[in-house]
Amino acid sequence: MGLAGNVKASIDPVALDAWYPVWADSELPRSATRHTVLLETKLQIARRPDGDILIRVPECGIDLPILRRFGYLWTSLGHPTRDLFQIPEFDEPDRRNLAAGSIGVRASAPRTVENFLDLGHLPIVHVNYLGIEQKAEIKPYEIEITEEDGEVLARNCRVYQPQASLVATSGFEVEYTYRVPHPYCAILYKSSAIDEARSDVIAILVQPVDQDRSVAHMMVSVLDDQSSDKAIRAFQQFIFGQDKPILENQVPTRLPLDPRAEIPARVDATSSMYRRWLRAQGVRYGTLP
Amino acid sequence: MTEASASEDRWFPLMRSEELVARHVAQARLLGQEIAVWRDDAGLANGWENRCPHRGVRLSIGINDGLHLRCQYHGWRFASGSGQCSFIPAHPDLVPGEAFRARVYRLIERDGYVWASLGNPLTLPSIDIPSGWQSVTLRSIAVNVAVRSVTAALVSGYPGAATVSVIDEFTLRADLTGSEPGFVLFLLQPMSDAECVIHALVASDLLPGDVLSLLRRHNAVLTALRDRLEAEADAA
């Protein structure tokens, strides 16, 4: 098949066969064609006048499979062996679901995901929004690989946040749950500022451009009937804008999976688990052995 | 690369001492290694591997608080001198162990320059200027070519110099004649296999009264040298 000749030998089978987000569904008008790069392969994404969507590798003229999930268009260069993960909250009728931004980063996809999973940086990088330095302590939390889905799951993560979201009117101790259901995608559940029984959902869905560059697609599914779409997007992009210069100054750009390469503290239990989980699955793309 | 291994145990100038100002963190490169260079409030200059041992963020984007270097990612503080981590904001009661330490390179200030070594040099760096002579340092110039290209260009001639001699692989001396006697000493800092910095100083038993025009003249010569070498490298 023509596509095989285009796919680099450096791409491991797990990375090759995964589904990836490549464009926000809402940002592809009818009759529009867009271009992006996935795993070093150029893609053409088009919506025909009749509304049909097409994702093609122009170099060989092959059309790729398409999924429409969580506000994004997903595709794969390999042969996906399983369906994409679920985010059940996305279908709850009273939520605001938004594609909150697609931002190119000079960092590998796993570095970008790990930053999203990182609790210790919240009071430092996002000071006065997602934490404050006077209450930067992170207490122990629960971390596991789920038996059912084999996902990384971190629960009971607590951090004091002065401005947890746009609708937060005062600071409060926010409870976080993290899920990593895909090598390059992570989902965060955080206590809602307006309904303490429920959670806002924020996901980072990362498109690996090559081993050292990625596009971070952000998805939010929030309980917020006040803020405009524009304001919700602007808040997420402001927060990510604080992370981007950090990510682009991490050396090396690829995520080291050898536990001796970088020294973790207890707060990094999620990141350590994520690295072990990538290694156990044989994910090599964007990592160092 | 052999150049790196053969050079590990020697000193290289990274910058002039006066350029390393208080509360700043400078970024330097030596033999492919990035170095974060910073001065504590007591005056001690530090040269550390330019990555936090925790999550790899460049320490040169961190904060120099006068006693510690504070990483921008998680606020970990590393002490001047030892590089030992002394505070982790996420665990304020924890005393970080020995492993939580920035990698510290040998660094010393002498004769107006900040010198570093990736290895363990047995001697101290020095610039030999006859006693009673005066010297003035030139602006350091980065060039996107290998050290050997700069050496070859300098050896082929330097304006106003009768001879240019190679003292060692990274040090050259141009003996001046005529109206401005003395010599120019070139100290080459290999940033990588393809980039270097020319540090240079002019020494004389009697510097001219108009030092500024002397600086301008040598700066013009070295700038032209850089432009020519980079153009040649681009063409090749």
Image (cartoon, rainbow, N blue to C red):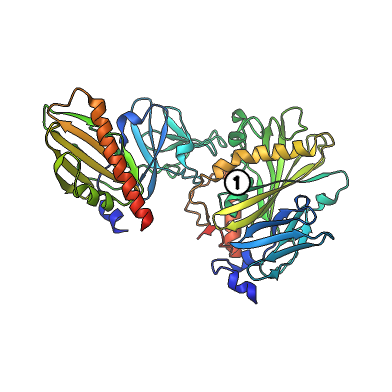
Image vertical order of residue B164 relative to residue A65, above or below: above
The answer, for residue A47, to whether it is visible in the render is yes
Residue drawn where x is 20% and y is 41% of the image: B159
Image vertical order of residue A39 relative to residue B92, above or below: below
Q: Residue under circle 1?
A: A115
Q: Of residues B213 and B174, which is closer to you in this image?
A: B213
Q: Of residues B110 and A193, which is closer to you in this image?
A: B110
Q: x%, y% of residue A251?
A: 48, 48
Q: x%, y% of residue B143?
A: 34, 45
The answer, for residue B193, to whether it is visible in the render is no
Q: Of residues B122 and A59, which is closer to you in this image?
A: A59
Chain to which mark 1 belongs: A
Q: Of residues A74 and A29, which is closer to you in this image?
A: A29
Q: Is residue B161 left or right of residue B57?
A: left
Amino acid type assigned to the residue bearing label 1 in the image:
Asn
Q: Is residue A179 left or right of residue B138?
A: right
Q: Quadrant of the C terminus of chain B?
A: bottom left
Q: Dot 1, how many residues are within 10 Å of its Cα: few (below 14), some (14-19), or many (20+)? A: some
Residue drawn where x is 75% and y is 33% of the image: A166
Residue drawn where x is 67% and y is 64% of the image: A18
Q: Is residue A259 left or right of residue B29?
A: right
